[in-house]
Image (cartoon, rainbow, N blue to C red):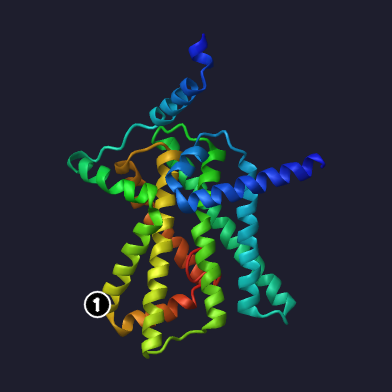
């Protein structure tokens, strides 16, 4: 087998292993990811997953009969997603420098990229459910039951996301809980502004972070 | 010399470096509570997520009623 194929296989194996690790034991996995010994090119698969979601969401929202609108929507979503990712990395890197942390840029990118897994998963499942059971939900027993299950699922994904966010700051910036709290307090209004901006530009109704 | 080459010794040194790279988490008077809670998220995260999210969702339904159903409709449009 040629070298590029072997590299590809090695990276995809690494990605799948770390994805399983983020699901089953995020703490151990993030500790390993943060030590800087792993190949950071594996995040390409996360970006590829996000791209697949953007293409799927564009097709669901616009339909496949309008190639111009479809391309426009896809570009909008990519732009929104990339700006959110770049903004978060820039923010974390600057905060790390201000707090005197010795964080590496590539390590931060790698750790934050893996926090996109819950986001991609939630957005994918929500768009699938939108196709199978289009809203609005009714006040029937099935509507109520679905609502409780959907909220429980969303909360579980949110908790997973929060854990990965915490671990990114803990291992990426090497800071304690008090500083993580402070960084998050400053981050919260920035995320609010980003969310409003994305909503007003009709890119994301819920921020893709 | 033999000790340095020993596999178990190297594993122990690696583990020591790993643990020492970040100082242990201290949260003042709540450190004990923190140390009790964290293992549930460290080693059985989905079990904890499932329990917390299910109870919270049920509690939110009791608290909000039909508003929760409307909220889900809004969230479903949110992708």
Q: Position of residue A156 (x, y in %)?
A: 40, 63
Considering the numbered disc 1 on the image, is that residue within a helix, a strand or a loop?
helix
Looking at the image, residue A109 sits to the left or right of residue B72; the answer is right
Q: As displayed, is residue A4 above or below residue A74?
A: above
Residue A72 rendering spot, x and y as whole percentages = 68, 71
- Comparing A103 with A7, the one in front is A7
Q: Nearer the viewer, residue A166 or B40?
A: B40
The reply to whether residue A190 is in sight is no
Q: What's the residue at 45%, 67% (across, down)?
A: A196
Q: Where A145 sits versus A204, above or below?
A: below
Residue A68 appearing in the image: yes
Q: Position of residue A157 (x, y in %)?
A: 43, 62
Q: Choose top left, top right, bottom left or bottom right for residue B75.
A: bottom left
Disc 1 packing (10 Å; few <14; some 14–19; many ≥20)? few
At x 27% / y 49%, what residue is drawn?
A: B37
Residue pushed farthest right? A2
In the displayed orientation, state which residue is furthest to the left: B29
Residue A181: where, in percent of width, then height?
Answer: 32, 47
Quadrant position of residue A69: bottom right
Q: On the image, numbered disc 1 is attached to which residue?
A: B63
Q: Is residue A125 above or below residue A139?
A: above
- Check the residue under mark 1 and report the chain it is in: B
Between A17 and A55, the residue placed more toward the observer is A17
- Residue shown at the point (66%, 65%) measured from the top left: A75
């Amino acid at each position: 087998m040629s070298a590029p194929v072997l590299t590809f296989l090695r990276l995809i194996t690494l990605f799948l292993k770390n994805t399983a690790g983020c699901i089953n034991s995020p703490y151990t996995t993030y500790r390993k990811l943060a030590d800087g010994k792993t190949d950071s090119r594996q995040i390409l698969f996360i970006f590829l997953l996000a791209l697949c979601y953007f293409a799927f969401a564009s097709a669901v929202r616009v339909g496949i009969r309008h190639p111009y609108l479809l391309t426009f929507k896809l570009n909008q979503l990519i732009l929104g997603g990339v700006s959110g990712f770049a903004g978060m990395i820039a923010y974390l890197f600057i905060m790390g420098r201000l707090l005197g942390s010795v964080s590496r840029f590539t390590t931060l990118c790698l750790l934050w990229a893996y926090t996109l897994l819950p986001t991609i998963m939630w957005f994918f499942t929500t768009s699938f459910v939108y196709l199978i059971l289009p809203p609005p939900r009714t006040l029937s027993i099935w509507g109520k039951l679905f609502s409780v299950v959907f909220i429980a699922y969303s909360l579980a994904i949110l908790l997973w996301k929060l854990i990965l966010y915490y671990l990114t700051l803990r291992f990426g910036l090497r800071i304690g809980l008090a500083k993580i709290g402070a960084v998050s307090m400053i981050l919260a209004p920035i995320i609010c502004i980003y969310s409003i901006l994305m909503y007003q530009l009709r890119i994301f109704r819920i921020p893709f972070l | 010399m033999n000790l340095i080459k020993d596999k178990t010794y190297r594993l122990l040194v690696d583990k020591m470096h790993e643990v020492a790279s970040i100082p242990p988490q201290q949260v003042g008077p709540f450190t004990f509570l923190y140390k009790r809670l964290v293992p549930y998220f460290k080693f059985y995260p989905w079990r904890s997520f499932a329990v917390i999210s299910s109870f919270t969702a049920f509690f939110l339904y009791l608290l909000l009623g039909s508003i929760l159903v409307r909220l889900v409709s809004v969230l479903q449009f949110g992708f």
